[in-house]
């Protein structure tokens, strides 16, 4: 009996040698794990990189490789010497006496990092320049707002600063601003170094009240001292000038204001036999501090301390302090002032690199910044 065969279609050349394929592996998701970070210094001078070195030492990191210098024609050039693609970049910029050069260094480095595809560019600017020009004066401009717009345009996505001259400056920025406080470090200095501290005096009453409440001290106020131009009427309110016999529409007549006359300097409160601590955020032109110290000495103050976050101490400030009744000036290292310390031994420095390094670590890891502001109120 013939056998029946099952006939199959002929094999094609491709099917004869077909090899089973492995299931394709999907590519890893972009940014599945948090990328690294780098810390750069935008300064071209050794005195200004000191704070950056302190911060990187506390972070256990190395300072980013870059070259910042001024060419012979005065132009600033920045060269990034390592890859920063997809990383968080922190630019530390302390402001020396040459403010405009420091601003250009920061802008050019931020733009270079943006061009190199950095993920986030965070500026660490302990003392924010032009912060005193945050209000309109006559026919001037709000330069602080202009600088905020320039930084955003250059590529910055976040800023860490310290004790802004006016808290409202944060509203000039289109990105987050962390305004840290130096008061815990200055308060610690008072508790450890100023023996038998009894009293606080202030050229900035809101700050002195905060210090007095935390140290459980009395509070006195200096009244009638030379104020900054922010409180003057020199802002264009009298423009156009009044002209006699000028034809004015009856509906435009405005009541005349009495001219201001500042009273002589006086102290409200008893400071006899006590240690006076003058508190402010910036100490630059020291004439008002020197005049206040003279009055306090006449009223019987035992010792006089001046404490501020930002020790700019420009022009003849070191000499005036050395020749004044001020016993000690305590500032932080937000601004380099080694030259001023050589000229005036009364100047002491408090290091704030700890809080800046912790802020960098928390921002990179996505942690809350609330710990750095514990027990600090909006009024501080």
Image: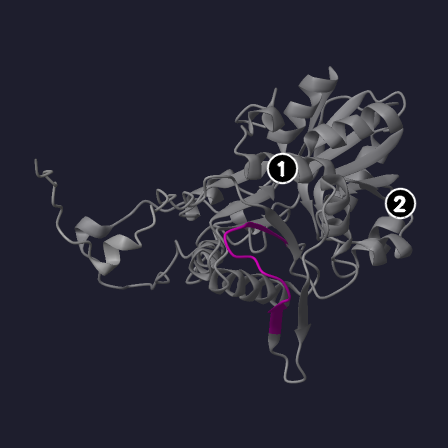
Left or right for 302, reference 271: right
Q: Is residue 201 above or below residue 236?
A: above
Rendering coords of residue 79 (x, y %): 62, 70
From which residue to which does the magenta span run? 77-92
Nearer to me, 103 or 241: 103
Residue at 75% x, 37% y is: 307
Q: Nearer the viewer, residue 355 or 308?
A: 355
Taking the view exactly as shown, the residue that stands out farthest to the bottom is 73
User: Can you give x and y, in whole percent of width and height, for residue 326 in the image?
Assistant: 85, 41
Q: Residue at x 74, y 34 (%)?
A: 278
State the image coordinates of residue 38 (x, y, percent, origin top left): 62, 51
Mark 2 to mark 1 CA distance (whole Å) = 34 Å
Q: Horizontal and vertical percent for residue 211?
A: 69, 24
Give the answer, above or below, for where 162 lies relative to 121: above
Which residue, given by chain and number where applicable, does mark 2 sit on?
Answer: 346
Residue pointed to by mark 1: 361
What residue sits 27% from the left and 54% below the top? 16
The relative height of residue 247 versus residue 158 in the rendered view (above or below) is below
Query: Regarding mark 2 in the picture, which secondary structure is present there?
Result: loop
When asked about the image quadrant of residue 105, the answer is: bottom right
Please give the name of the residue rendered at 7% of the width and 35% of the height, measured from the top-left corner.
1
Q: Is residue 342 left or right of residue 356?
A: right
């Amino acid at each position: 009996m013939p056998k029946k065969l099952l006939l199959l279609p002929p094999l094609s050349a491709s099917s004869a040698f077909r090899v089973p394929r492995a299931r394709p592996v999907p590519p890893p998701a972009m940014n599945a794990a948090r990328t690294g970070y780098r810390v750069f210094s935008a300064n071209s001078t050794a005195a200004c990189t000191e704070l950056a070195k302190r911060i990187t030492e506390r972070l256990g990191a190395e300072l980013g490789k870059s070259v910042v210098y001024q060419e012979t024609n005065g132009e600033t050039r920045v060269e990034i010497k390592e890859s920063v693609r997809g990383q968080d970049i922190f630019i530390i910029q302390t402001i020396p006496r040459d403010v405009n050069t420091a601003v250009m260094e920061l802008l050019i480095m931020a733009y270079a990092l943006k061009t190199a595809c950095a993920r986030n560019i965070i500026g660490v600017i302990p003392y924010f320049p032009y912060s005193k020009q945050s209000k309109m004066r006559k026919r001037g401009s709000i330069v602080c707002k202009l600088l905020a717009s320039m930084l955003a345009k250059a590529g910055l996505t976040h800023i860490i600063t310290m004790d802004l001259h006016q808290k409202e400056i944060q509203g000039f920025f289109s990105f987050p601003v962390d305004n840290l406080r130096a008061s815990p470090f200055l308060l610690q200095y008072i508790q450890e170094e100023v023996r038998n501290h009894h009293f606080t005096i202030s050229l900035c009453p809101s700050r002195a009240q905060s210090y007095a409440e935390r140290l459980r001290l009395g509070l006195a106020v200096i009244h009638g001292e030379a104020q900054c131009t922010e409180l003057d009427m020199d802002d264009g309110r009298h423009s156009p000038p009044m002209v006699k016999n000028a034809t004015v529409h009856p509906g435009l007549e405005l009541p005349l204001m009495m001219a201001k006359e500042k009273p002589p300097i006086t102290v409200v409160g008893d400071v006899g036999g006590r240690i006076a601590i003058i508190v402010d955020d910036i100490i630059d032109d020291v004439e008002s501090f020197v005049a206040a110290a003279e009055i306090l000495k006449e009223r019987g103050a035992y010792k006089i301390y001046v404490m501020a976050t930002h020790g700019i101490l420009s022009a003849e400030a070191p000499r005036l302090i050395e020749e004044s009744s001020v016993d000690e000036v305590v500032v932080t290292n937000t601004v380099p002032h080694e030259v001023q310390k050589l000229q005036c031994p009364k100047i002491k420095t408090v290091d704030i690199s700890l809080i800046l390094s912790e802020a960098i670590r928390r921002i990179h890891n996505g942690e809350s910044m609330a710990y750095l502001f514990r027990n600090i109120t909006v009024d501080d």
